Image (cartoon, coloured by chain):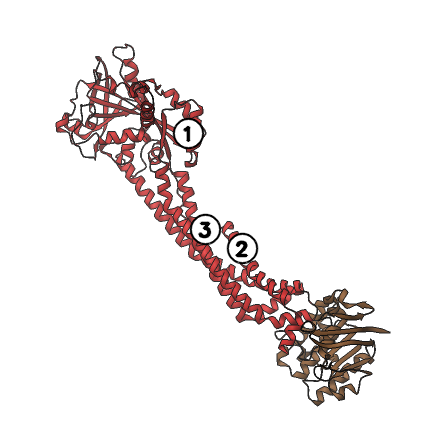
Chain colours: A red, B brown
């Protein structure tokens, strides 16, 4: 107990020395605090991104693997392709029945004709199939029911009818390639024969929102379905006019819900000669970016054919959080540099300090105080000074780092919200929150954000318990480091030599 | 009865190249005052260091209460059994007179109800009142600092008090006063008081004188 009392007396009566040590520790603490809080904030944002960013995985045929197999063996690509089983909706739902999957979205496309709408010819088009190609890539062919050329090549309709299971699957709207110019997108809960069409198709046929169009089976014109135009969109990409047929012309695309599209395809199956060929594409929304590998393994375990490959947007997620990860790394490096430089300064200062207090060590040892107790007194002094300075430094660090962290957070949220708003505008919705329940979430999911996500817009506890513990740890580390030097010096000092040299 | 015995004590510096003490045999009893005298270089201070346990004997023994001090806890011996009054006082300058005394009591592990009161009584015994007791030692005169050093050496009631040139830094008046205090420690408090000095006046008032001769060569 007297050691603590002595240490406190020594601190209070040797102010200059202790203030100097205190200032150095304070600078270390302040810098460490800011670095730790920035690192924590960055990690927090990455965590938030991880939770909100929707990782999508799509299944597609691995053409390079097929080509490789074809080159190494006698089987040609066409034979291998035709041997690959098509993925059914039941397969997809089975794969989606996983702890790693949050949701499954899919679309079915088929070719149709119309009895009251004329297709846009390739020579007059203004849009291009490049968007379709891009869309096809991102969604991948999840389950082509016929690989023998596009929809059999015979009796193909002029229009491409695409039925989506949810608006989340409409990547062209999400990424802004398509934008509604009139009306609004039907909701996810809509199973009626509602559709949206391109502005070119609408203009060519003087169609407006509310117009009725009749779609027919190209193989049997008696099979008809009437659809209501609920929206008109524009394709923002430019055209090169090189489509081989009208079906491939993006202007002739009609978008509807999956149920409506499936109804037409199912109806056509009553007669094998009039059966429509359809293509099923899927997109799995994963719970977490870290689950992709496990999901892939699970797909293999569930019997997914080896020629299918999983494509995801994990790379895009990794890129999006790279600046935050870099910030976190820079903060860590800064912290390390501060600790190394601060630690060296503190050790050197303490070496001088102990040399200066050599006489005191000699006296204490001469009156019978053991080396350990002398060292303990010095360590106690250092601990007290360090922790007072650390507390002040942590408080100052907390005060300065909270606004910085919140500024970072706000700018990040603002950026995400701006993207979200843009997505909503692409769907022709005002205010950015329209659509049915779950729709906004799904749409937003493609951008790693969601309309119904409540963002943390204030980090009040940047200096939380963990940071305080880390700072305390730094304090202990610095004290041990610098007092270690003290202990070495004290153990080497012989009282008689010290006192006789002074005499 | 001997409280401290020096048996065949020899000591040299520079790995034996510079001998300072050779076959010393002294005997000290409680209640008596001793003077160890000798010319400069005769090994007086070395002997004091060996007696006080600040230095370890290389040949011969120093026995405290019949125990070889090189085989006992020397810190404990220094903090409880022997009080050393250094020529240069060796007080802690950032502490007051009283705090210096209390520190020695703490180091000795003394169990006293009121340490301040006890320390003050020690300081009063050497002629320092409460006012001086609460002053930092740097603000005291040389004589006063010497008294604080004596009070510190007495505070934990050791059997032996060793003083190295206790009057070396003092004027005539203070010298007489300090010697009176030291003499009283032996006669009144039954301490064994050993004074290392080269002052003839000091050696005249002690009970026994041990003379150290420089080793020739």
- The percent position of residue B198, horizontal first and vertical second, equals 73, 85
Mark sitting on residue A462: 3
Q: Residues within 10 Å of mark 1 (few under 14, many from 20)?
A: some
Name which quarter of the figure residue B43 lies in.
bottom right
Pointer 2 residue: A472
Q: Nearer the viewer, residue B38 or B125?
A: B38
The Cα–Cα distance between marks 1 and 2, rounded to whole angstroms, is 43 Å
Q: First in sequence: mark 1 or mark 2?
A: 1
- The percent position of residue B117, horizontal first and vertical second, equals 73, 73
Pointer 1 residue: A296
Name which quarter of the figure residue B17 lies in.
bottom right
**A424 relative position to A462: left or right:** left
- The percent position of residue A376, horizontal first and vertical second, equals 63, 62
The Cα–Cα distance between marks 3 and 1, rounded to whole angstroms, is 37 Å
Q: Residues within 10 Å of mark 2 (few under 14, many from 20)?
A: some
Mark sitting on residue B8: none
Determine whether A498 is above or below A382 in the image: below
Determine whether A426 is above or below B160 in the image: above
Q: First in sequence: mark 3 or mark 1?
A: 1
- Asked if badge 1 and badge 2 are on a common chain, one would say yes
Q: Nearer the viewer, residue B115 or A143?
A: A143
The subunit letter for the residue under badge 3 reads A
The subunit letter for the residue under badge 1 reads A
């Amino acid at each position: 107990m007297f050691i603590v009392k002595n240490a406190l007396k020594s601190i209070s009566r040797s102010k200059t020395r202790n203030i100097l040590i205190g200032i150095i520790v304070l600078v270390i603490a302040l810098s460490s605090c800011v670095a730790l809080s920035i690192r924590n904030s960055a990690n927090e944002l990455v965590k938030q991104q991880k939770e909100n960013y929707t990782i999508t995985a799509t299944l597609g045929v691995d053409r390079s693997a097929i080509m490789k197999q074809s080159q190494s063996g006698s089987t040609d690509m066409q034979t291998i392709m035709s041997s690959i089983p098509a993925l059914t909706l039941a397969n997809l739902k089975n794969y989606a029945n996983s702890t790693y999957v949050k949701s499954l979205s899919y679309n079915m496309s088929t070719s149709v004709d119309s009895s009251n709408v004329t297709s846009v010819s390739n020579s007059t088009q203004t849009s291009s199939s490049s968007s379709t190609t891009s869309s096809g890539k991102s969604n991948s062919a999840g389950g082509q029911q016929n690989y023998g050329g596009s929809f059999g090549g015979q009796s193909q309709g002029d229009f491409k009818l695409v039925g989506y299971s949810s608006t989340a699957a409409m990547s062209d709207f999400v990424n802004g390639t398509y934008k509604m110019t009139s009306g609004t997108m039907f909701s996810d809960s809509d199973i009626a024969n509602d559709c949206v069409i391109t502005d070119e198709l609408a203009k060519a046929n003087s169609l407006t929102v509310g117009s009725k169009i009749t779609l027919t089976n190209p193989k049997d014109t008696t099979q008809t379905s009437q659809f209501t135009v609920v929206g008109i969109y524009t394709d923002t990409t430019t055209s090169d006019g090189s489509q081989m047929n009208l079906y491939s012309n993006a202007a002739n695309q009609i978008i509807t819900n999956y149920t409506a599209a499936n109804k037409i395809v199912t109806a056509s199956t009553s007669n094998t000669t009039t059966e429509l060929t359809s293509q099923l594409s899927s997109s799995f929304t994963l719970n977490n970016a870290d689950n992709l590998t496990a999901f892939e393994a699970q797909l293999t375990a569930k019997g997914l054919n080896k020629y299918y490959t999983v494509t995801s947007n994990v790379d895009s997620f990794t890129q999006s959080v790279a600046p935050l990860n870099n910030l976190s790394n820079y903060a860590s490096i800064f912290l390390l540099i501060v600790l190394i430089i601060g630690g060296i300064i503190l050790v050197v200062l303490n070496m001088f300090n102990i040399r200066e207090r050599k006489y005191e060590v000699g006296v204490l040892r001469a009156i019978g105080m053991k080396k350990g107790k002398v060292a303990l007194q010095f360590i106690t002094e250092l601990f007290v000074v360090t922790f007072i300075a650390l507390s002040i430094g942590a408080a100052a660090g907390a005060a300065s780092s909270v606004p910085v962290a919140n500024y970072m957070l706000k700018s990040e949220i603002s950026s995400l919200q701006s993207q979200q708003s843009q997505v909503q505008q692409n769907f022709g919705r005002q205010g950015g929150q329209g659509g049915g329940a779950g729709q906004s979430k799904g749409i937003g999911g493609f951008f790693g954000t969601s309309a119904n996500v409540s963002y943390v817009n204030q980090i009040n506890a940047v200096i939380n318990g963990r940071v305080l513990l880390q700072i305390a740890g730094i304090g202990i580390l610095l004290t041990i480091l610098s007092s270690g030097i003290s202990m070495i010096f004290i153990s080497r000092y012989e009282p008689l030599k010290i006192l006789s040299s002074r005499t | 009865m001997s409280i401290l015995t020096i048996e065949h004590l020899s000591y040299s510096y520079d790995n034996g190249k510079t001998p300072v003490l050779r076959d010393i045999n002294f005997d000290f009893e409680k209640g008596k005052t001793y003077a160890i005298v000798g010319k400069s270089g005769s090994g007086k201070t070395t002997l004091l260091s060996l007696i006080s346990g600040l230095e370890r004997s290389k040949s011969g023994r120093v026995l405290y209460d019949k125990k070889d001090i090189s085989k006992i806890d020397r810190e404990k011996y220094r903090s409880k059994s022997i009080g050393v009054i250094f020529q240069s006082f060796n007080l802690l300058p950032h502490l007051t007179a009283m705090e210096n005394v209390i520190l020695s009591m703490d180091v000795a592990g003394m169990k006293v109800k009121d340490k301040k009161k006890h320390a003050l009584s020690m300081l009063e015994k050497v002629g320092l009142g409460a006012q001086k007791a609460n002053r930092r030692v740097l603000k005291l005169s040389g004589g006063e600092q010497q008294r604080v050093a004596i009070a510190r050496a007495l505070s934990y009631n050791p059997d032996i008090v060793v003083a190295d040139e206790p009057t070396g830094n003092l004027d005539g008046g203070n010298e007489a006063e300090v010697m009176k205090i030291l003499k009283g420690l032996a006669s009144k408090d039954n301490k064994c008081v050993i004074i290392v000095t080269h002052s003839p006046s000091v050696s005249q008032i002690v009970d026994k004188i041990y003379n150290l001769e420089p080793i020739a060569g």
